[in-house]
Image: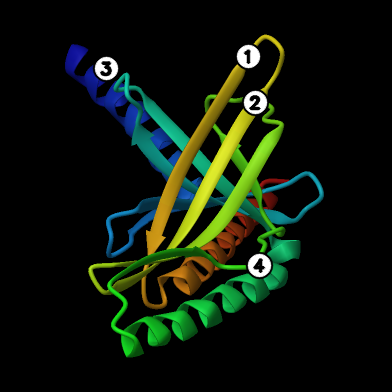
Amino acid sequence: MKRKMLVLVGIFLVIPMWMFAQNKYEHQANTKFGTSLKFSSYKGNNGYYTATVVQYYYDTDNKVQCISISINELNIFKFEKELLSIQDYYKKWSLTAKNNNVVDIEKEIPVQITSIDLSHCAIGHPNEKNIKVIFKVMSSRPICILRITVGLNLSTSNKHYTREWWFCDDEILAMLDQAGVSIWKQRELDNKKQNTLDLFK
């Protein structure tokens, strides 16, 4: 009798975890420079999906922190246009650096990213959100950097968190592709779940 009870408990522990995993799509990608990003998405109350790109890291106190960007599917095309502009600058300036034997330089790319939202897990409602796009050449290798700053400025508290996401080649555009995949996969899972629920009426 005890053995049967243990088997049943085991089944009930495994199945909910499996079902939960099937209801949430997440995947991770690493850039060539080692920036590790986790992609996922969720359906908002308005019926539209939002993709999130999160970077987890350890702070100086060895605590896990996370900084993220969110892209609503209504802004996907605007985000794509911004990233294409960034990519154009990256390619043009990479060629300029190569033709002029530039081995070390850092310059801000004059493209504003306004289609996304920024957040940090340590700040509930940040009042400072800033993202800069940096072109950098290091040891003759061109790099595109997203420098993300999230902060809270109050009379009683001041917190600021800055992280850099490093990309090269076409990786900045691949981030858009991965965000789109997360929305598509999550919508597919949600529809499958709803179709299953509709069977029981």
Q: Quadrant of residue 77?
A: bottom right
Tell me the mark number nearer the camera, choosing from 2 and 4: 2
Mark 3 lies on residue = 5
Mark 2–mark 4 distance (CA, rounded to whole Å): 25 Å
Mark 3 and 2 residues: CB-CB less than 8 Å, in contact? no
- As helix, strand or loop, the secondary structure at mark 2 comes to strand
Sequence-first tag of 4 and 1:
4
Tell me the number on the disc at residue 157. Answer: 1
Q: Residue furthest left?
A: 3
Mark 4 and 1 residues: CB-CB less than 8 Å, in contact? no
Judge from the rendering whether residue 122 lies leftward or rightward of residue 61; answer left or right: right
Name the residue type under label 4.
Phe
Q: Quadrant of residue 4?
A: top left
Mark 2 lies on residue = 152
Mark 4 lies on residue = 79
- As helix, strand or loop, the secondary structure at mark 3 comes to helix
Name the residue type under label 2.
Leu
Sequence-first tag of 3 and 1:
3
Query: Which quadrant, please, contains the N terminus?
Result: top left
Sequence-first tag of 2 and 1:
2
Is 64 or 25 nearer to us in this picture?
Answer: 64
Vertical position of residue 169 compared to residue 160: above or below: below
User: Is residue 189 something that shows in the picture?
Assistant: no
Vertical position of residue 172 compared to residue 89: above or below: above
Mark 2 and 4 residues: CB-CB less than 8 Å, in contact? no
Vertical position of residue 189 compared to residue 159: above or below: below
